Image (cartoon, rainbow, N blue to C red):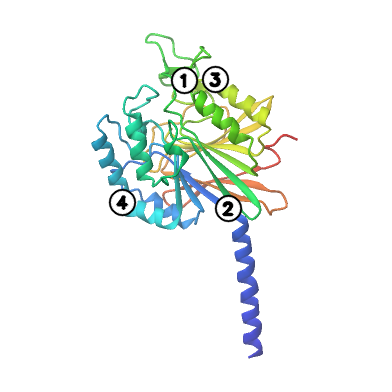
Amino acid sequence: MRAQFFLSLFLSVFTAKLTSESDSKFKIAFGSCGKQTHPLPIFYEVVKQNPNVFIFLGDNIYGDTHDMDVLKKKYHELGAKESYQHLIQNTEALATWDDHDYGQNDAGKYYTQKESSKQIFLEFFKEPKNSERYKHHGIYHSVYKKTGNKTIQIILLDNRTFRDDLVRFPKGQKIPGRFFYRPDYLPHTDDSKAFLGEEQWFWLEDELKKKADLRIIASGSQFSHEYNGYESWTNFPHEQKRLIQLIKKTKANHLLFISGDVHYAEVSKFEHPDCYPIYDVTSSGLSSTWRFATPNKNRLEGPIMENHFGLLSVDFEHDDPHVLTEIWDIRGNQRVEFSIPLNEISFH
């Protein structure tokens, strides 16, 4: 009996310790670029990591249509999948969009079905009817999560609804020497061209003034990588600079990006003299793949070309609080483990 008592006591203390450690750590899984015609077994791997939330970063389906009945059908294909049902039954799902689920490849504000597409998006992801998303143009939104006495702010950007058209790379123009492929787009030189749009900028400034212990900006397009001639924030360098200045103005500490679109994973670090470094963890390829990774002098980890998802874990009770960044592939292998100290992504 005495041995049994001590065994019981040990197990209760051990279980309490595990529970305490688990409760102090908040896990955010994320990914993008999943085709509705694919079985998407990656969602089973996501659930194995037991995240508190999963963020869809865009290209959540490949809609690419002006026919809203077709768009609804493609969302239904995703929703009916056993792997998707397994995901949403085991973790909370948040979402923003990119071009293919918005409705048209590389589209911006001139896509004629954007209001109808928005309604289908919100209904599919079961956005509460009292959500602010129904009350303004676009789907930008923020969500707050508590872990202990700390607050995590998740900012879901809309990089489609308000965006001006891109500048096409001219036919016949010499391809820059560092490229081994033909770029699609050039950076804008006209500072009046919009990426987020004034309405969204006004909202974002208000969000960055709010109290948070960690801020995660979810963007369909990459922010921190090097210009590569494809779609990204680098097509609007004045908007990139504007965000840096906004972070400085609002003194918004502990901010990092998660992004998708490119069909591979990488961790990039954008450095600017007016701000702390902006890390961008790109996870793209829930089912999609690409032939190559583009040049990126800001890349710290990756590229991972196989299907995968990203995972952020934060433990505020650690002696040196940090965000642990991971990439997990379709075979359940951890491919990236990279730590971002919170004291590095803050104004001192």
Q: Which mark is residue 207?
A: none
Q: Compute the Cα span from label 4 to label 1.
A: 39 Å
Please state which amino acid type lies under the numbered disc 4: Lys
Q: Measuring 36% from the left and 32% from the top, which residue is drawn there? A: 102
Instruction: Name the residue carrying label 2.
Output: 26
Foreground tag (4 vs 1):
4
Q: Residues within 10 Å of mark 4 (few under 14, many from 20)?
A: some
Classify mark 3: helix, strand or loop: helix
Q: Which mark is residue 81?
A: 4
Q: Which amino acid, by three-letter code, is at mark 1?
A: Phe
Q: Which mark is residue 179?
A: 1
Residue 124 at x, y percent in the picture = 35, 44
Distance of mark 4 from mark 3, alpha carbons? 39 Å
- For disc 3, the marked residue is 237
Q: Does any portion of residue 301 appear in the rendered image?
A: no
Residue appearing at x 56%, y 24% in the figure? 240
Is residue 112 in view?
A: yes
